[in-house]
Amino acid sequence: MISASVTLTQPLSNHRQFIATSGTGHHFLIDDAAGNTGAKPIELVAIALAGCTAFDVINILRKKRQQVTGYEVRVEAEQTAIPPQVFTQVRTHHIVTGSDVSPQAVAEAIRLSEEKYCSVGAMVKATAEFDTTFEIVPAIVPAMVGA
């Protein structure tokens, strides 16, 4: 079971800042745009999506013995104008850095994450269309001195 709690930090003020606690005991601030001391809850959904797919993709690429030396996932999401302002369009861009990384391996890892493994993506897909891209950046290998 997944669990979490949020506790209002300043109950006697008009602020909407909370301390969020995960079921595993990790803490972080969440806030609204006015307070701006932590991520907004909807931003956490985008972060969760990026993190979920990143875990899947790097795990698959490592199993495929790809020489990944760096990896980043960027997510941008459009929302409806009226509440509950769900995501309608999600753009995900994967940047894989490495040596001799196979584009086919990256494409397959992303496909498996999106179609099979990423639980956050499965939930977001209920309201949003996905557009996914990736790029492979060759790793810069320093030259051997005196070689």
Image (cartoon, helix red, strand yellow):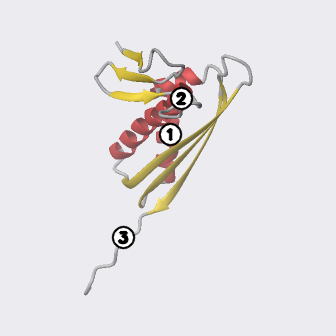
Task: Tell me the SS state at disc 2.
Answer: loop
Image quadrant in which you'd find residue 27? top left
Amino acid beneath label 1:
Ile
Kindly identify which residue carries mark 1.
Answer: 110
Q: Are marks 2 and 1 in contact (CB under 8 Å)?
A: no
Residue situated in front as seen by the camera: 144 or 76: 76
| 132 on left or right of 110 | right
Query: Can you say whether 28 is above or below 131 in the image?
Result: above
- Residue 17 image position (x, y, % from top left): 47, 24
Amino acid beneath label 3:
Val
Image quadrant in which you'd find residue 60? top left
Image quadrant in which you'd find residue 21? top left
Q: Residue furthest left?
A: 146
Q: CA distance from mark 2 to mark 1?
A: 27 Å
Kindly identify which residue carries mark 3.
Answer: 141
- Residue 35 image position (x, y, % from top left): 54, 31
> N-terminal of the two: label 2 or label 1?
2
Front: mark 1 or 3: 3
Residue situated in front as seen by the camera: 106 or 129: 129
Which quadrant, please, contains the C terminus? bottom left
Residue situated in front as seen by the camera: 113 or 78: 78
- Disc 1: CA contacts within 10 A as few (<14), some (14-19) or many (>=20): many
Kindly identify which residue carries mark 2.
Answer: 40
> N-terminal of the two: label 2 or label 3?
2
Q: Residue furthest front?
A: 12
- Residue 123 image position (x, y, % from top left): 54, 20
